[in-house]
Image (cartoon, rainbow, N blue to C red):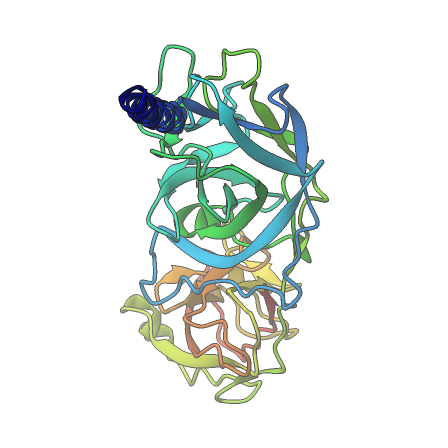
Amino acid sequence: MRMFRNMTGRWSFLLLAKIALTGWLVLYGQAWAAQECRFGNGGGGTTYLVNGSYPQGIRWAANGGGQMLTMRELATFELNLSPTLTSECSMGNDGRQLGEHSTDVPYTYTRGRGPQIDGEMGNYYTTNIEGVVFSVKIYSSAGGGYFGGGGDVDSKGWSTLVNPSDTIWDGKTWKARITIWQDSYDFVDSKGNQKNYTTITPLTTFSLGEMTLGDPSDSNNKPWTFMVTPTTFQVPIVTSTCQTAQLDEGNNIDLGEYMMSDFNASPRTTNFRVQILGCDNVWAVDVKLLANKTTGSQNELLGNTLQGGAEGVGVQLYADNSTPLPPNGLAFTRLSTTTAPGSSFGLMNFSAQLVKDGKAMKAGEFKGIATLNLSYY
């Protein structure tokens, strides 16, 4: 009897050991169950980028003096999403990857794709000012990605931005980051901010594209569409101003005395310069010559305003000593080398030549009157 009781106690101990071991094996199996992530409840939707703010205003990046880098960053700031977008992860096998699908109808508001401030790639989108674009990164504290930032695109137009090995997206709130860019070449071609816009906004209301967490074709991993409107952000532009403009020789330019025979030789050139001082955020200046009295076969010369004076001659003006500046014609544009406050625009070189206008010549006094109209922006 004593031996029987001892055997019973030993078998009870072994049974308890098996129960503990079984429980450990069950917990171990749960730790390796597949996990998937999704935006919100997985049903998809549409959200708008809102409340963008950059209160200090932007300055144009100077393009003069050979400063022609393709893209120049003007501003970077955060925006909220409305409705708010969150993400969660749970058991499932539809993946955790962050994917994007750029709007493709037909990239109307997209201006190519290129490097971003953090070294990633992304699309550029149009604003109300030609040559000024913006890019968008959708992100959380665990990371994110740009529209147009993925690599290979699948048959349905989706590309993967991030494919994490664990559930980094769980319990995250998502935002947007906007970067405003000045495309140097397009900005020059479109003559900068010649229309004097005071703010930078998205060009119109349009979709940036879609993003998803997990497989976008699954019923509970549906994508979200991201929209912008002209009120998504309104970035102020520092007003372009200058204090004074002056000729280095005063308002009268003496062309000297001429003999009739002088007009059979190469024209004599008289140089003068104009300087604009105390400028702030001036990217360029347009110089236009205005005159009431003109002459020449195409009215390309300043005419003599004196009654009974010299005839058969007129004054040809040049900007930078080589570009013809006809009266009442197209403006000559000079790009600035700096847009910093208090800067001078530098000396702009001009020249004048008294030349024959094709009519019969007559000796006498000559006086041409013109106004140099300077428009800066």
Q: Which quarter of the figure is the C terminus placed in?
A: bottom right
Residue displayed at 43% across by 25% down: 35
Residues 46 and 69: in front is 46
- In the rendered image, residue 147, in percent from the top left (x then y), is placed at 46, 34
Tell me the quarter of the picture where residue 354 sits.
bottom left
Q: Is residue 281 above or below residue 223?
A: below
Q: How many marks can you see?
A: 0
Residue 20 position within the rendered picture, expressed as x and y whole percent measured from the top left? 37, 28
Describe residue 184's horizontal placement relative to residue 220 as left or right: left
- Asked whether, in this view, residue 368 is left or right of residue 101, the answer is right
Q: Nearer the viewer, residue 319 or 68?
A: 68
In the image, what residue occupies the spot 35% across and 44% down? 120
Q: Classify residue 52 as left or right of residue 263.
A: right
| Residue 172 drawn at (x, y percent) | 56, 42
Which residue is situated farthest in the front direction here? 1
Residue in the image at 42% along x and 20% along y: 158
- Residue 151 visible in the picture: yes
Instruction: Reply above or below: 303 against 39.
Output: below
Based on the displayed image, in which of its 4 quarters is residue 157 positioned? Answer: top left
Residue 209 visible in this rendered orientation of the protein: no
The answer to which of 241 and 183 lies nearer the viewer is: 183
* Observer-nearest of 180 and 343: 180
- Please tell me whether residue 256 is drawn above or below residue 281 in the rendered image: below
x%, y% of residue 239? 65, 68
Q: Which image quarter holds the N terminus?
A: top left
Residue at image location 40% in from the left, 61% down from the top: 63
